Image (cartoon, rainbow, N blue to C red):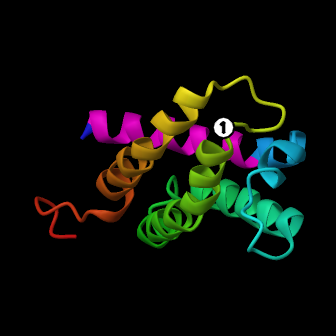
Amino acid sequence: MKLKAFLRDILAVFFVMAGMNHFRVPSMYVSVVPAWLPWPANLSAIAGVCEILGGVGILLPGLRRAAGWGLVALLVAVFPANLNAALVRHMQGSSLSPAMLWARLPLQAVLIAWVAWVAVARDRRLGI
């Protein structure tokens, strides 16, 4: 259980920092929103707010599962932007190589599994 709590804390910090980065370097995130989606700046800001709220939410037992499901949905929703970054081989304001942009794609599944384990899965030993 201590490992799970530790990994939940790390994940929370990751999401809060990533969310804050949407406002610190907005051009990096706006630049990868696919052209077929409207209002890229607004979508990026919404994603940033959701990352911050989700990161905080998974730390709060009463909100943990809902925040976890929200983060899973967010990770699925932002996948097209990450794919677009890999396809255009560039993320404005980022030094990630094209290979790293492609390597980020399967990491989405790792993040989803991580969120599912530390925030969504019920602890069968506790009956919750």
Quadrant including the N terminus: top left
Asked if residue 65 lies left or right of residue 44, the reply is left
Report x, y in % for residue 35: 77, 67
Residue range of the region highlighted in magenta in the rendering: 2-19
Q: Is residue 9 above or below residue 77?
A: above
Spot the residue most to the front.
88
Instruction: Tell which of 15 and 6 is nearer to you.
Output: 15
- Magenta stretch: includes residue 14: yes
Of residues 10 and 88, the one drawn nearer to the viewer in this rendering: 88
For the image, the number of numbered tags is 1
Q: Position of residue 60 (x, y in %)?
A: 52, 59
State which quadrant residue 120 falls in.
bottom left
Measuring 51% from the left and 52% from the top, which residue is drawn there? Answer: 59
At x 59%, y 43%, the residue is 86
Q: Which residue is mark 1?
A: 89
**Please, which residue is most extreme toward the left here?**
125
Q: 113 above or below 7?
A: below
Q: Residue at x 88, y 63 (%)?
A: 41
Residue 5 lies, in percent from the top left, at: 36, 41
Q: Locate residue 111 relative to residue 93 in the image: left or right.
A: left
